[in-house]
Image: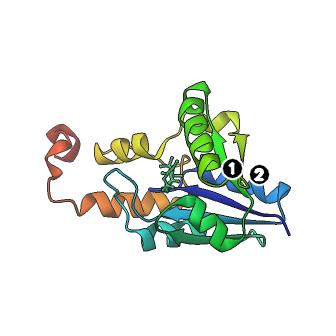
Amino acid sequence: MTLALYPGSFDPATYGHLDIARRAAAIFEHVVVAVYDAPPKNVLFSTEERVTLLRESLRDAPNITVDSFTGLLVDYAKHRGAKVIVRGLRAISDFEMEFQMALLNRKMEPALDVVCLMTSVQYTFLSSSILKEIVNLGGNVDGLVPKHIAEAMREKLAGRTDPGEIPRYLTS
Ligand code: PNS
């Protein structure tokens, strides 16, 4: 069985991520969407929350499972018996970072290969960080992430300790 890993921060998953997961699932027998436990950036959602949001989004896909991992991706891939890493490309600007990661991963584990899938054109402008910024400033992300994720973002950001960033004219 060809098992592919689709790793990422998924903080939270957008329709772009879900599109890549489903595209991968149409190519490989099984896809494990692997949520990285400790990305080098501030995360809005805990690892468990990111996993739960993804599971809910992909529960209709029989050959996709969602898991989380710590440590090096190459070690996790070996542990799962995966030979392929899937990553999404939105634009040329993504390529440089993906190329660097792919070559470093290959240096550490030559048997592991990376397959990059192009995101559907309607999702090329999406990124988790920009969507978090929009919600943080009182904007609407409906249609860019599944409903339950938009709701979770609103709830999470409503509970923040520094709600001073939304201009008064939007809240009064
Ligand atoms: O969604 P992201 O933030 O672009 O995903 C990046 C991710 C999680 C794939 C990358 O940071 C990763 O693989 N982290 C695991 C630790 C690791 O192996 N680092 C060396 C990468 S060359």
Residue 109, how many percent across, how many down? 65, 55
Quarter of the image where one finds residue 130: top left
Q: Quadrant of residue 79?
A: bottom right
Q: Residue at x 23, y 64 (%)?
A: 159
Q: Is residue 48 left or right of residue 100?
A: left
Count of numbered badges drawn on the protein: 2
* Marks 1 and 2 close (CB-CB < 8 Å): yes
Q: Which mark is residue 127?
A: none
Tag 2 residue = 23
Residue 59 shows in the view: no
Q: Position of residue 49 (x, y in %)?
A: 43, 70
Q: Amino acid at mark 2?
A: Arg
Residue 50, placed above or below residue 125:
below
Q: Amino acid at mark 1?
A: Ile
Q: How many other residues sit within 10 Å of disc 2, few (<14), some (14-19) or many (≥20)?
A: some
Looking at this view, is 7 or 136 the one in front? 7
Q: Secondary structure at mark 1?
A: helix
Quote the CA–CA distance across marks 1 and 2: 5 Å
Asked if residue 45 is positioned above or below residue 143 in the image, the reply reads below
Figure check: 162 above or below 54: above
In this figure, which residue is indicated by the disc labeled 1?
20
Question: Quarter of the image containing the N terminus?
Answer: bottom right
Say which element carries label 2.
helix
